[in-house]
Amino acid sequence: MRRRGSLLEWLWNTVQQGERRIIRVMVLASVLLLLMQLSAARDPLDFYMKVASEVEAPPLELPALAKPELEQSVKTWQVTLKATPAAPIRVVQNGTVIATLANGEQKVAVKSGQIQLDGIGIAQTVKVQVIDKDAQLLEPRQNQMFILQGNIQNLIVKP
């Protein structure tokens, strides 16, 4: 019996020593973390000034001005659209109405991106066809047809 009691005592002492070591390691890690944080912010005024300058005047990340994508986005192309029957279809790009197809056929100066053919409020079915376009444009295709039934159709302009 005595041997059994000493084995349990030995096991209990081992567990307690392990707990003490774990607590010591955690206290040491907490102290190291506190020291690291204090060394990062040596002078609170410098830290505040740095943060305040970033908030008041954030660094501007301007894209390079000579990128070919920007040159293409500025360029305009001519696309001729024909509405059958003639209807007040609005041609919208970037939120701006650039043309109206009330006369049936209209030549439109467009930029690369997306164009909307707005037929909302028109009761009849209207077909809009791309009659002519610049040769550099891949989209829209020549003779491409869009059918508007009082809705909006999106048209891609891609060189």
Image (spheres, helix red, strand yellow):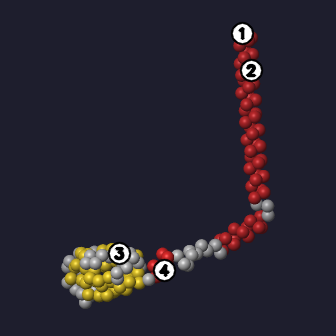
- Mark 1 element type: loop
Task: Please name the residue shown 37% across and 79% down the image.
Answer: 136
SS label for mark 4: helix
Residue name at image x 73 percent, y 41 percent: 26
Give, as a three-letter code, the residue at label 2.
Trp
Q: Is residue 145 visible?
A: yes
The percent position of residue 16, horizontal first and vertical second, equals: 74, 29
- Give the mark nearer the N terminus: 3 vs 2: 2
Q: Of marks 3 and 1, which one's residue comes earlier in the chain?
A: 1
Q: Which residue is mark 3?
A: 138
- 85 and 48: which is toward the camera: 85
Taking the spot 72% from the left edge, 24% from the top edge, the residue there is: 12
Q: First in sequence: mark 1 or mark 4?
A: 1
Which quadrant: the N terminus? Answer: top right
Residue occupying the point 26% across, 87% down = 105
Distance in Å between CA atoms under marks 4 and 3: 17 Å
Ranked by sequence position, the earlier of labels 2 and 1 is 1
What crowding class fits label 4: few (fewer than 14 Cα within 10 Å), some (14-19), or many (20 or more)?
few
* Residue at the disc numbered 4: 71
Report the residue marked by disc 1.
1
Mark 2 and mark 1: Cα distance apart in space: 14 Å
What is the crowding at mark 2: few (fewer than 14 residues within 10 Å), some, or many (at least 20)? few
- Label 4 vs 3, first from the N-terminus: 4
Rendered view: 57 above or below 100: above
- Say if mark 2 contacts mark 1, CB within 8 Å: no
Q: Are marks 1 and 4 in contact (CB under 8 Å)?
A: no
The quadrant where residue 112 appears: bottom left
Residue designated by label 2: 10
